[in-house]
Image: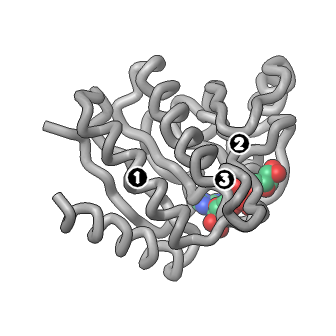
Amino acid sequence: MAGRIVVKAGDITREEVDAIVNAANESLLGGGGVDGAIHRAAGPGLLQECRRLGGCPTGEARTTAGYALPARYVIHTVGPVWRGGGAGEAELLARCYQRSLEEAEAHGVRTMAFPAISTGAYGYPLAEAAEIAVRTVARHLANGSPIEEVRLVCFSETARRIFAEALARHCGER
Ligand code: APR
């Protein structure tokens, strides 16, 4: 039985799952948006661990502990900056989801939550990002993954609706 995908609105720092994914930058030294929220909620231990990682290339993922967060792990991934769609952004964004899922499995994660990677400061259009997120996660879960639930946590009702529509379209295709 393939794991399920859930779309919801909320603050990802409050999700009670094994791992939450952070939309970080290549320094892994914190920032605004969801990166800032996760560091604030996790506490200073998160930044101390991140400092020892030496950064993360775009499209890659690194795992740390969750510290004061409900989640046991934080999987930091670096999404592409949107440059109009002709610079391989779609492949890089898909890689963020794929590598985060692989990191989760390597740590025995069974439930996890993603934010809408790259759709804030990095300017990725929500509809395209939602399509990539749903397609990449659904394909991975359909290939025998032990992950039981993946939540796509949106920070606005608009984003939630767009992600829910992408999920409904994907399910309708099967
Ligand atoms: N919970 C869930 N989603 C959130 C939260 C939160 N607490 N805060 C913000 N978001 C949403 C935003 O609304 C957006 O849809 O996360 C999505 C990603 O937006 P950003 O956090 O701006 O991340 P991104 O677009 O990937 O840009 C990354 O911003 O914060 C810096 O250090 C980060 O340099 C990096 C860049």
Q: Give the residue at x 20% y 63%.
A: 173
Percent x, y of residue 151: 40, 52
Q: CA distance from mark 2 to mark 3?
A: 12 Å
Q: Amino acid at mark 3?
A: Glu
Q: Give the residue at x 37% y 38%.
A: 111
Dots 2, 1 in contact, CB < 8 A? no
Q: Give the residue at x 50% y 80%.
A: 157
**Relative to residue 114, is residue 83 depicted above or below?**
below
Frontmost residue, 158 versus 132: 132
Q: Residues within 10 Å of mark 3 (few under 14, many from 20)?
A: many
**Relative to residue 123, is residue 118 depicted above or below?**
above
Quadrant in the rendering for residue 149 = top left
* Residue 77 circle label: none
Residue 38, can we see it? no
Percent x, y of residue 167: 33, 64
> Would you say the beta carbon of the disc 2 residue lies within 8 angstroms of ligand 1?
yes
Dots 3, 1 in contact, CB < 8 A? no
Q: Is residue 24 left or right of residue 116?
A: right
The residue tagged 2 is 78
Q: Amino acid at mark 2?
A: Val
The residue tagged 1 is 151
Q: Amino acid at mark 1?
A: Arg
Which quarter of the frame holds ligand 1? bottom right
> Would you say the beta carbon of the disc 1 residue lies within 8 angstroms of ligand 1?
no
Q: Secondary structure at mark 1?
A: strand
Q: Residues within 10 Å of mark 1 (few under 14, many from 20)?
A: many
* Marks 2, 3: nearer the viewer: 3
The residue tagged 3 is 89
Report the quarter where the C terminus lies: bottom left
Q: CA distance from mark 2 to mark 1?
A: 18 Å
Q: Give the residue at x 32% y 33%.
A: 147
**Relative to residue 17, is residue 162 depicted above or below?**
below
